[in-house]
Amino acid sequence: MSIENGNKLNQLLKKRNSGGLYFSAWLKENGYSDQLLKKYRDSGWLTSLTKGVMFRSGDKLRSFPVLESYNEQLKKNYHIAAHSALELSGFNHYVPMGKPLLMIGHPKQEPVPLWMLEGDFGHSIKFFSTETFSKPQLALFNVEYPHLQASGPEQAFLECLLLAPKQYSYMDLYYIMEQLTTLRPQVLQLLLENTDNLKVKRMFLFMAEKAGHYWFHSLDTGKLDLGSAKHQLVENGVYVSKYKITVPKELYDYE
């Protein structure tokens, strides 16, 4: 291998990308030809995961670096969401059994590639896409992953409600709601005013009022479009006329 090619390889391997991926499209944009990448693979420096996707030979691929490199190199917008984002904020009602679950939200126009669905990156990754939140509230959770954001706790809980009751039970989510004493009313107001999902808005307000959080009284519910139609969220539940929703009896009766 020439000195020039060796220097380019050193530059590549020195990138802080342990456990992450290299994408051929990005590599080519940065001066790595197909012929050079083939030499790296043939020499055992890089290993192919699938066509156009490589990693440093010997690396153990990990979820966060994989998502970080995917977002950074291919300009994607995947984010840590729902209960996974709540866990990063310190709210952890769920006790993982076996391989931990990582919930990832992504734009509808950015479908999940097959290699990501089938890969083993240390988590069981579950993906969902939605356009429900027109003004998403995301933030960096770790300086080591500057291109991977997580939902703020306000949006994360709303995402959980969006995925209930299929992914989460309403009762489990209420146990989490009881912990959410520090939610920011101004962020909640922004999200709720710009969310068109009536189920999410109504159930959130019901739970927040039931939990008696101080920030609930700072919300201007008069600015929220809650619709007028009744929504039956569960079978054989209790109808709450104020919010026009049917909720689980266990949740309604819980004190």
Image (cartoon, grey):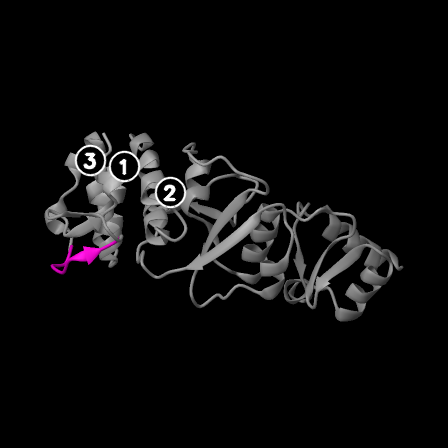
Q: Residues within 10 Å of mark 1 (few under 14, many from 20)?
A: some
Q: Residues within 10 Å of mark 2 (few under 14, many from 20)?
A: many
Q: Which is the main secondary structure of the residues drawn in magenta? A: loop
Residue 176 location in percent, x, y? 35, 35
Q: Which residue is mark 3?
A: 210
**Reading the chain from its start, which is encountered first: label 1 or label 2?**
2
Residue 64 location in percent, x, y? 57, 46
Q: Is residue 214 above or below residue 196?
A: above
The span shown in magenta is: 226-233
172 and 137: which is toward the camera: 172
State how far apart marks 2 and 3 are (Cα).
22 Å
Numbered circle sitting on residue 152: 2
Q: Residue at x 25, y 45 (%)?
A: 248
Q: Quadrant of residue 21?
A: bottom right
**Reading the chain from its start, which is encountered first: label 2 or label 3?**
2
Judged left or right of residue 67, residue 251 is left
Q: Residue at x 16, y 54 (%)?
A: 226
Query: Is label 1 in contact with label 2 (beta carbons under 8 Å)?
Result: yes
